[in-house]
Image (cartoon, rainbow, N blue to C red):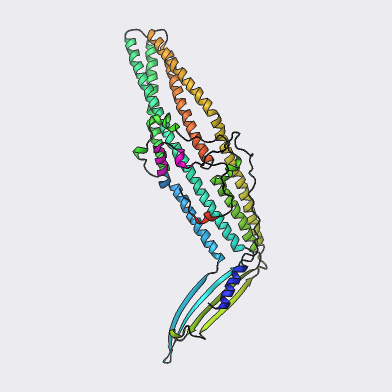
């Protein structure tokens, strides 16, 4: 390459990006109170999802969902799409150099001529004095980082939804077992009542009450097969595949194994909310809109482009690289906007309006995150007392039923009193299953709304586009 052309390229690269017209970006203050909870959360671990679930069946179901779920697959492909857009846009910051070679042979009036040439050319390269190309690249990079955070948000939601669906299935299995136990008990009671009625010990009304109780229990038990089938279908939709039999929940999981979930902190500083993937995605969108303003402002100024080439030509291939066969050209060009009917000014106002929209969206995302954490913590604050009270109520209902059964056998109470005691016990058992499920789902909700776990004092991200733009997010 001739020395003059090389010097031209070096000078062009040195002059690009002299001015940046994008407004300076500073992370907005969180539009929420300084703390999302009153309790201390110092030292709370950064939880990886496998550490969140101690039951291997839950971990297996979640792992299957992370491999097969189509929503997560789409989110990952969107990251790859955004990465390609960024690389394509960022490539405009460097000159495009191409090489051509050719040979011709022609004849006129019996005279044959031939020509061979080789050329290295610099296509039209914009000297980015005002940062237009640089800001377009920065906007694409921020969009890439936002897509990566959106994918992480989808993954965290998928983990939480899969575990929640598995737990709900287990709870419904327990409810089905309770309904079947109730039906069996009512049928035994009905058989006893029929014998006593045949002996004249009870009236026809008592027998009718027992028969009604059995029919009611049959109706309740009959509803659970459809409910459990729906639980399976919902979980398998999240998984994107059939659930292996080894990963299926059992009825006793609602009260035993499921409770072995890792606990989560009772309060977090609001700065943690800014590390949630949806909040980070909103922030990257805001950063991208700042860069778009710089690109729109730069479009109002003159643009200068360079075109250059260097090569050699000869009538014979052997003479291509001989002295005197070289050629070169250099052609700068400038474009100055004079009148466009206000289109460029409108483009700037549009970019600024988009920035304001992104800012409002960021604030709303942070506020939504704060509410989700605050709501989950508010529920958690009462769960221990509610579980203790419900367990005490269950114990009392069991004692009531034992006394009612003894008094009924002794003839000192009525069938209606026995049925009331049985209904009270069943209601207390069902309520305890529901409350234990709520406690487990609350832990999963906290894991989700905290962005998959956190650690006090961790470095976090400052919202600036970094080397993550060139890395694929990992599961």
Report the magenta stretch's main SS.
Answer: helix
**Camera sees residue 219:** no
Q: Is residue 385 left or right of residue 181?
A: right
368 over 253 or under it: above or below: below
Q: Can you give x and y, in whole percent of width and height, for residue 239 in the image? A: 41, 43
Q: Can you give x and y, in whole percent of width and height, for residue 394 in the image? A: 46, 21
Q: Is residue 169 left or right of residue 385?
A: left
* Closer to us: 150 or 70: 150
Give, as a single range, the part of the protein colored magenta. 47-64
Q: Can you give x and y, in whole percent of width and height, for residue 409 in the image? A: 37, 10
Residue under the image location 44 percent in, 25 percent down:
430
Residue under the image location 51 percent in, 59 percent down:
85
Quadrant in the rendering for residue 303: bottom right
* Closer to us: 140 or 260: 260
Residue 61 belongs to magenta span: yes
Residue under the image location 47 percent in, 22 percent down:
391
130 over 417 or under it: above or below: below
């Amino acid at each position: 390459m001739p020395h003059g052309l090389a010097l031209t390229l070096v000078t062009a690269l040195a002059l690009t990006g002299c001015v940046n017209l994008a407004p300076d970006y500073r992370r907005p203050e969180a539009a929420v109170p300084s703390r999302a909870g009153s309790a201390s959360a110092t030292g709370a671990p950064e939880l990886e999802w496998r550490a969140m679930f101690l039951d291997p069946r839950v971990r297996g179901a979640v792992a299957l969902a992370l491999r097969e779920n189509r929503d997560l697959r789409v989110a990952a492909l969107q990251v790859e799409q955004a990465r390609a857009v960024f690389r394509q846009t960022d490539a405009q910051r460097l000159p495009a150099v191409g090489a051509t070679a050719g040979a011709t042979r022609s004849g006129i009036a019996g005279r044959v001529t031939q020509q061979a040439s080789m050329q290295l050319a610099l296509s039209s390269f914009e000297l980015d004095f005002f940062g237009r190309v640089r800001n377009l690249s920065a906007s694409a990079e921020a969009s890439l980082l936002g897509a990566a955070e959106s994918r992480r948000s989808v993954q965290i939601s998928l983990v939480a939804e899969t575990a929640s669906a598995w737990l709900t299935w287990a709870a419904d299995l327990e409810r089905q077992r309770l309904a079947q136990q109730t039906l069996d008990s009512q049928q035994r009671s009905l058989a006893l009542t029929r014998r006593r009625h045949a002996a004249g010990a009870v009236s026809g009304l008592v027998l009718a009450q027992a028969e009604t109780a059995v029919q009611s229990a049959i109706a309740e038990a009959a509803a659970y097969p459809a409910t459990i089938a729906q639980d399976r279908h919902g979980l398998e939709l999240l998984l994107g595949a059939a659930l292996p039999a080894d990963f299926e929940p059992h009825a006793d999981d609602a009260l035993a194994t499921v409770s072995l979930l890792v606990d989560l902190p009772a309060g977090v500083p609001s700065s943690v909310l800014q590390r949630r993937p949806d909040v980070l995605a909103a922030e990257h969108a805001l950063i991208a809109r700042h860069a778009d303003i710089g690109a729109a402002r730069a479009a109002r100024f003159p643009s200068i482009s360079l075109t250059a080439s260097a090569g050699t030509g000869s009538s014979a291939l052997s003479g291509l690289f001989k002295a005197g066969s070289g050629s070169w050209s250099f052609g700068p060009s400038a474009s100055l906007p004079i009148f466009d009917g206000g289109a460029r000014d409108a483009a700037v106002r549009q970019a600024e309006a988009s920035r304001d929209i992104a800012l409002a969206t960021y604030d709303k995302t942070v506020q939504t995150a704060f509410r989700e954490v605050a709501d989950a913590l508010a529920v958690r604050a009462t769960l221990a007392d509610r579980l203790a009270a419900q367990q005490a109520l269950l114990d009392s209902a069991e004692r009531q039923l034992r006394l009612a059964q003894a008094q009924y056998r002794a003839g000192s109470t009525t069938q209606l009193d026995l049925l009331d005691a049985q209904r009270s016990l069943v209601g207390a058992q069902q309520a305890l299953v529901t409350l234990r499920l709520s406690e487990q789902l609350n832990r999963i909700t906290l894991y989700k709304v905290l962005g998959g776990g956190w650690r006090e004092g961790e470095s976090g991200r400052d919202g600036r586009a970094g080397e993550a733009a060139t890395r694929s997010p990992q599961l």
